[in-house]
């Protein structure tokens, strides 16, 4: 069993302070890996985590498991939830863990002398049993894990914009590869610049500030 105190110290060092979501990240990571029968931290890619929010919660997950976006073992689907899905890639065993309903109120029972809700949660989440702290639900993924992991080293150019696509994230249509942006799934809107960029930026700043 990992040393929770040491893991919390590592997580807090990234922020210069410790917050309840970091504690939840560490506790959730340990609970998920214990349930899957996986030792942590890991040096391989057998464990994958899909987190449902970003921020300090992620730091707790990372320090406890060794999973990181850089190793492609930690992904974020931003639903704004302090929850995560833990996947044993080899066995295709998948478990989603989320905070149990009412844990903020329950925290006062574990810290009866602490009237401040922030510190009640911070300290209670360190000691509450997993059964009080989390819900654990076996789930299946809509996208197969092998497709999520994809095939490293594969590169192809989009038939429209010409930008390179890696990790088999292209979409094929009539035999041609397209990137997500060129088929209308971009997270941004492209702005056609009719003027040199410095002049455009200057005019927008002037119009915004002085209009």
Image (tube, rainbow, N blue to C red):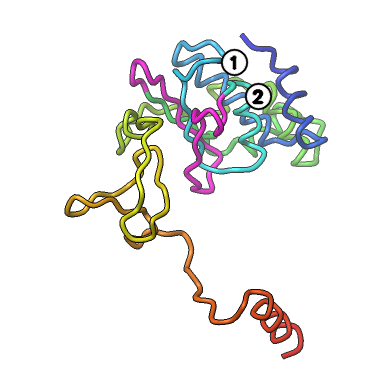
Determine the residue positioned at 66% across, 36% down.
21
Which x, y percent locates residue 94?
Answer: 38, 25
Which x, y percent locates residue 49?
Answer: 48, 29
Q: Tell me if residue 126 is in the magenta stretch.
A: no
Q: Quadrant of residue 200?
A: bottom right
Circle 1 Cα neighbour tier, 10 Å, few/some/many (<14 / 14–19 / ≥20): some
- Residue identifier under label 1: 41
The segment highlighted magenta reads 67-93
Q: Residue furthest left?
A: 174
Judged from the image, the secondary structure of the residue bearing numbered disc 1 is: loop
- Residue identifier under label 2: 63
The answer to whether residue 104 is left or right of residue 81 is: right
Of the pair 168 and 32, the residue shown nearer to us:
168
Determine the residue positioned at 42% across, 53% down.
163
Q: Tell me if residue 77 is in the magenta stretch.
A: yes
Of the pair 113 and 147, the residue shown nearer to us:
147
Q: Quadrant of residue 154?
A: top left
Judged from the image, the secondary structure of the residue bearing numbered disc 2 is: helix
Q: Quadrant of residue 112?
A: top right
Determine the residue positioned at 57% across, 38% down.
102
Above or below: residue 19 compared with residue 33: below
Circle 2 Cα neighbour tier, 10 Å, few/some/many (<14 / 14–19 / ≥20): many
Which x, y percent locates residue 140?
Answer: 31, 31
Asked whether the beta carbons under mark 1 and mark 2 sit within 8 Å of each other, the answer is: yes
């Amino acid at each position: 069993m990992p040393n929770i105190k040491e893991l919390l110290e590592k997580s807090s060092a990234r922020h210069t302070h410790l917050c309840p979501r970091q504690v939840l990240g560490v506790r959730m990571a340990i609970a998920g890996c214990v349930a899957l029968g996986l030792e942590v931290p890991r040096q391989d890619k057998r464990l994958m985590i899909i987190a449902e929010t970003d921020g300090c919660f992620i730091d707790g997950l990372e320090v406890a498991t060794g999973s990181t976006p850089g190793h492609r073992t930690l992904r974020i689907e931003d639903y704004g939830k302090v929850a995560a899905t833990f996947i044993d890639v080899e066995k295709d065993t998948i478990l989603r863990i989320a905070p149990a309903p009412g844990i903020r109120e329950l925290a006062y029972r574990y810290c009866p002398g602490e009237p401040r809700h922030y510190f009640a949660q911070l300290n209670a989440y360190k000691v509450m049993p997993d059964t009080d702290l989390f819900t654990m639900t076996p789930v299946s993924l809509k996208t197969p894990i092998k497709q999520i992991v994809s095939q490293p080293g594969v590169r192809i150019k989009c038939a429209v914009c010409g930008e390179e696509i890696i990790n088999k994230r292209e979409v094929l249509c009539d035999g041609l590869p397209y990137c997500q942006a060129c088929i209308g799934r971009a997270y941004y809107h492209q702005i056609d610049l009719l003027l040199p960029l410095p002049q455009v930026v200057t005019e927008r700043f002037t119009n915004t500030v002085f209009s």
